[in-house]
Image (tube, grey):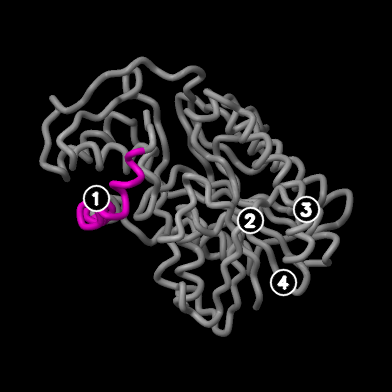
């Protein structure tokens, strides 16, 4: 199988590439073309473990470059589109890059795949497109009610995927995941931000009352779910991918404090961000019917993630020069 992976040097995309080429999904002889723009969140070091793999080719480029996509796309058996701007806080400051990459870029990927007659496309999205839910859980049939510029741009991309499936018959499948955590995540996100702050002896900034609820999913489980959708999903369908571990941000913070041997005095209350969604919760029964179940126990996964950041300061310290909230 020959796969084009966009956003391949980012947190989730690089995890998928490393696992794919290591045989974690049982594939043999797979060929990967890894495409990444290498913005601040794309890091070639994330792909170092597979750099010399005979099935790996890296291309530095932008999914908004139609000419490049037209050159790369032919001959691939599938495309998995991870490429996106993803940080909510940055989208609130400036939405332009999110619209350009997440909407325009996704449209370009879909068009290029259709033009090149690529048999399958998996578009990787987020549960944030559903908005906020007070009780119960979203299914794939729930309406899209995004509240942040980031989530709105991802919802726009999801709707484009739907349109290409319905209008042109393109085999495109959409996945929507809950909050990811794990190694190689950029330290602007809550888990690595809090962990690296604690390792540096700093406080951790907790938004508002800290009672916003998120479902947590280890990146390994997320990528297994994506690969399952690639192999067994149905054309034009959406699949939620959850971790089954709902926590308030305050609960998550105290778990990280405990693992890092720090006390509650290290929590710094900060004003809530605009439009902060209160609760996310997804029902992933549709994917579980295909055989998916999370394998990484949250307590073990979180402890292993903290240990990875503790053991790899050379990876994250240069990234902390970039302003984070």
Residue for point 51% across, 66% down: 17
Between discs 2 and 3, the one toward the N terminus: 2
Point out the frontmost of discs 1 and 3: 3
Name the residue furthest top.
Answer: 271
**Quadrant of the rendering where the N terminus is positioned:** bottom right
Relative to 237, say whether 98 is above or below.
above
Q: Main secondary structure of the magenta part?
A: helix
* Residue under label 4: 76
Secondary structure beneath disc 3?
helix
Secondary structure beneath disc 2?
loop
Rendered image: mark on residue 66:
3
Residue for point 19% across, 32% down: 202
Between discs 4 and 1, the one toward the N terminus: 4
Nearer to us in this view, 31 or 58: 58
The answer for how far apart the CA atoms under marks 2 and 1 are is 32 Å
* Residue under label 1: 306
Residue 19 percent across, percent down from the top left: 46, 69
Magenta residues?
Answer: 304-321
The answer for how far apart the CA atoms under marks 2 and 3 are is 10 Å
Nearer to us in this view, 186 or 12: 186
The answer for how far apart the CA atoms under marks 4 and 2 are is 17 Å
Indicate the quadrant where residue 320 lies. top left
The answer for how far apart the CA atoms under marks 3 and 4 are is 16 Å
* Residue under label 2: 61
Point out the frontmost of discs 2 and 1: 2
Secondary structure beneath disc 4?
loop
Point out the frontmost of discs 3 and 4: 3
């Amino acid at each position: 199988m020959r796969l084009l992976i966009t956003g391949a040097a980012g947190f989730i995309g690089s995890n998928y590439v490393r696992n794919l080429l290591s045989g974690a999904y049982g594939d043999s002889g797979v060929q990967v073309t890894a495409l990444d723009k290498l913005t601040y969140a794309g890091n070639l070091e994330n792909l170092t473990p597979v750099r010399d793999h005979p099935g790996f080719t890296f291309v530095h480029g932008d999914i908004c470059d139609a000419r490049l996509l037209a050159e790369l796309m032919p001959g691939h058996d599938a495309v998995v589109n991870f490429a996106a701007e993803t940080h909510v806080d940055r989208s609130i400051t400036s939405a332009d890059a999110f619209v350009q990459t997440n909407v325009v870029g996704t449209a370009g990927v879909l068009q290029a795949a259709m033009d090149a007659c690529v048999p399958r496309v998996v578009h990787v999205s987020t549960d944030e497109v559903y908005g906020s839910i007070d009780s119960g859980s979203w299914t794939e049939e729930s309406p899209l009610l995004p509240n942040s510029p980031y989530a709105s741009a991802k919802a726009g991309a999801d709707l484009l995927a739907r349109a290409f499936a319905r209008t042109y018959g393109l085999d495109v499948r959409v996945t929507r995941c809950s909050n990811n955590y794990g190694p190689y995540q950029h330290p602007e996100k809550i888990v690595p931000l809090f962990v690296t702050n604690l390792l540096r002896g700093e406080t951790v900034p907790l938004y508002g009352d800290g009672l916003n609820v998120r479902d947590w999913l280890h990146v390994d489980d997320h990528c297994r779910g994506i690969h399952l959708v690639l192999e067994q999903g149905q054309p034009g369908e959406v699949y939620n991918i959850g971790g089954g571990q709902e926590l308030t941000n305050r609960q998550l913070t105290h778990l990280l404090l405990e693992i890092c041997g720090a006390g509650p005095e290290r929590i710094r209350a900060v004003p809530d961000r605009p439009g902060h969604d209160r609760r996310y919760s997804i029902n992933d029964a549709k994917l579980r019917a295909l055989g998916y179940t999370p394998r990484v126990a949250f307590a073990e996964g979180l402890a292993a993630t903290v240990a990875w950041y503790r053991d790899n300061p050379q990876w994250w310290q240069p990234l902390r020069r970039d302003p984070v909230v």
